[in-house]
Image (cartoon, rainbow, N blue to C red):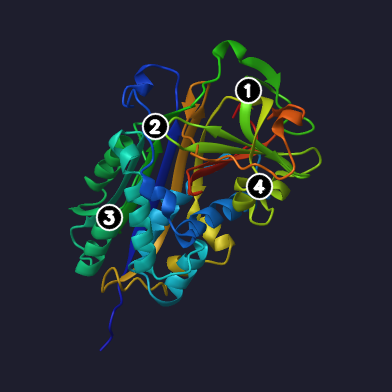
Amino acid sequence: MTIKRHRYLFVLALLGTGCQSGSENSQSNQSAEPVSIDSTYRNLPKQSIEPINEFAVQTLRDMAGTNDTANAMISPWSAEECFGMIRLGAKGQTDEQLKSFLHQNVSPEEQAKVMSRLRVGIANLVSANIIRQANGIWVNKNFSILPKFVSGTRDFYKAESKQTDFPEPGLSEINSFVSKETNQLIPKLFDSLNAATMLVLVNAISFKDRWDTPFEKSMTKDMIFRVDSSNSPSVATMSRTGKFSYGENEKCQWLNLPYRTGLRMLVLLPTQGTSLQAAIEQKGLLEEIDSHFRQREGTVWIPKWKSNFDWNIKTWMNQHGLSKPYDGSADFSGISSGSLSLSQAIQKTYIQVDEVGTTAAAATGEFTAAANHESTQEKPFEFKADHPFAYFIWAPGGVVYFAGLVRDPTK
């Protein structure tokens, strides 16, 4: 007797948006008073934040080393959430490759508990609608998933499993969920799905926050941005003089721009003659930078920008030798007794930065004094982001929500 093995396909989708517009309408969902991160967020063990940060830095470093000239933005938080759900059902080499991709070193269940704790720590921001964070699972009515996977994704990741039909109404339901959870900034995730789709997992995260000290619109001027030796477009550039959390070394300057919530944006600007990749690949980048900030007087120039980025994670993982989740021997037996393989994994992101704010990063107690230096004796610094730079949107404790490259603010 011949036994036929049926292989079913499922789709993984990750979305992240960071937007701050100066318009009154865009701010209508934010509290008039500053909202801070819960104190539990500030006391997390290193093993809970290191995988997210390592994923952010190493992925951004690799992206900076490509010949691509476009802007890029990823959400490491979103990746850890969505792939974390998948790990609850992955076994053997399939899980090992997912674990490697995510820079995790613990079991799926242990990592799920970590992500749950991180989510508790931002509860204040979620309730104030500054952060929207949601996971969703859509299951073909003709396909069954194991109760343990359903309960695990629900209990740890707050993901409700919904039965539907593909392509419709599943396609419309998913696109509607995406639009709602990203404040309509990503109005549609998929153009089409086919009847062979058995399972779709989605993570959506969006941020809106204001600078703690806004940039004056009257100070925004057109300045040259040196994309490369042959391209220097004129870009609307914000500027402000005052005290900033600042640091530098021979490879780069770095700047922390605070936001009302306690989030912050770290801007990493390579020095002349240093590539963007070389600036990012410094050993222990975020930890080293975070321990060498000083409060200093200076003048800052930062371009305004708005960009979308579509990241084909499946292609990325294949290029890095992590193809097991997508091939015929994938083991997702913790999801279903049927034979499953991952057919797509994509992330879409959107960001807008202006004088009012962005999806941002700032921390309480972020300044660290350097030994044998008095800031009053130092010459005011200049931080002129007029050439490609990197940024990290993160929080006290160093958890990165978004990380990106600005190669050309006009794109």
Residue bearing mark 2: 185
Per the image, label 4 sits on a secondary structure element best described as helix
Per the image, label 2 sits on a secondary structure element best described as loop
Residue bearing mark 3: 195
Per the image, label 3 sits on a secondary structure element best described as loop
How many numbered marks does the figure carry?
A: 4
Report if residue 242 is visible in the image: yes
- Within 10 Å of disc 1 (Cα), the crowding (few <14, some 14-19, many 20+) is few
Q: Mark 1 is on which residue type?
A: Gly
Disc number placed over residue 64 in the picture, else none:
4
Q: Nearer the viewer, residue 256 or 144?
A: 256
Asked whether the beta carbons under mark 2 and mark 1 sit within 8 Å of each other, the answer is no
Q: Position of residue 137 (x, y in %)?
A: 27, 54
Relative horizontal placement of residue 253, taking residue 338 as reference (left or right): right
Upstream in the sequence, badge 2 or badge 4?
Answer: 4
Asked whether the beta carbons under mark 1 and mark 3 sit within 8 Å of each other, the answer is no
Marks 1 and 3, how far apart in space?
58 Å
